[in-house]
Amino acid sequence: MARIEATYEGLDTRYVVTNIAQCGMQWLYESLYCARGQAENLIKRHKSQLASDRTSCHSPLANQMRLILHTAAYWLMLAVRGAIPAPQTLASGEFSTIRLRLLKVAVRIKETASRVRLAFAANCPDAALFRGLVGSLTQRPT
């Protein structure tokens, strides 16, 4: 099977060689080939933007624990990105961008017996988005 796409930059030709004959070529390309590429992109993002490839401890158990913690951070970032409304540019942003704009934010925290109040700087550009995310991530299903 071959897929050829003409763009302004030239021809983009992709080949898929397989012995699977029970399904159509378009389904094979879109469901299997593209899904494999997406999985590789997610692994690359896991390694590069969450530093999960830094397993430099001497103990294999310590390295495994580090990888578990990095995977938990990955799922947390997926949940945060999934909670961002679609019109926002961060809804499809890279993890490093989300981390810089939403998680590494200077804020004054005041904790009382029943609440946690966050005081943002007056010129924080993402304060409204952050408040909306906190609300949507803390809602409990009924």
Image (cartoon, helix red, strand yellow):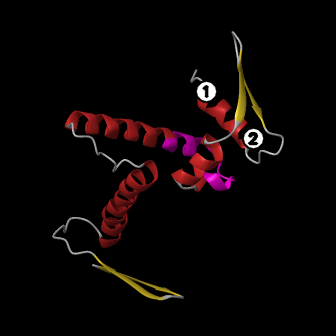
Relative to 135, is 96 on the left or the right? left
Q: Is residue 54 above or below residue 117?
A: below
Residue type, numbered disc 2: Ala
Q: Is residue 18 above or below residue 100?
A: below
Which quadrant does the C terminus fall into?
A: top right
Q: Residue at 36% of width from left, 54% of height from top?
A: 43
* Residue under numbered circle 2: 127
The front one of 71 and 87 is 71
The N terminus, quarter of image? bottom left
Q: CA distance from mark 1 to mark 2?
A: 17 Å
Judge whether 37 appears above or below 92 on screen: below
Is disc 1 placed on a helix, strand or loop?
Answer: helix
Give the residue at the far left of this rendering: 19
- On the image, the x and y values in percent for residue 99 come to 57, 46
Q: Is residue 51 left or right of residue 63?
A: right
Residue 80 is one of the magenta-drawn residues: yes
Mark 1 vs mark 2: in front = 2
Inspect the image, locate mark 1, and give the three-letter code of the amino acid beneath it: Thr
Q: Which residue occupies 54% across, 55% down? A: 94
Q: Nearer the viewer, residue 36 or 115?
A: 115
Give the magenta-colored segment's residue range: 77-90
Q: Main secondary structure of the magenta part?
A: helix
Q: Which of these two is toward me, 81 or 20?
A: 81
Q: Which residue is mark 1?
A: 138
Residue found 27% across the figure and 39% down from its top:
63
Q: Is residue 18 above or below residue 56?
A: below
Label located before the other in sequence (1 or 2): 2
Picture coordinates of residue 62, whole percent (x, y): 27, 34
Q: Is residue 89 shown left or right of residue 60?
A: right
At label 2, counting other C-alpha atoms closer than 10 Å, the crowd grade (few under 14, some 14-19, many 20 or more) is: some
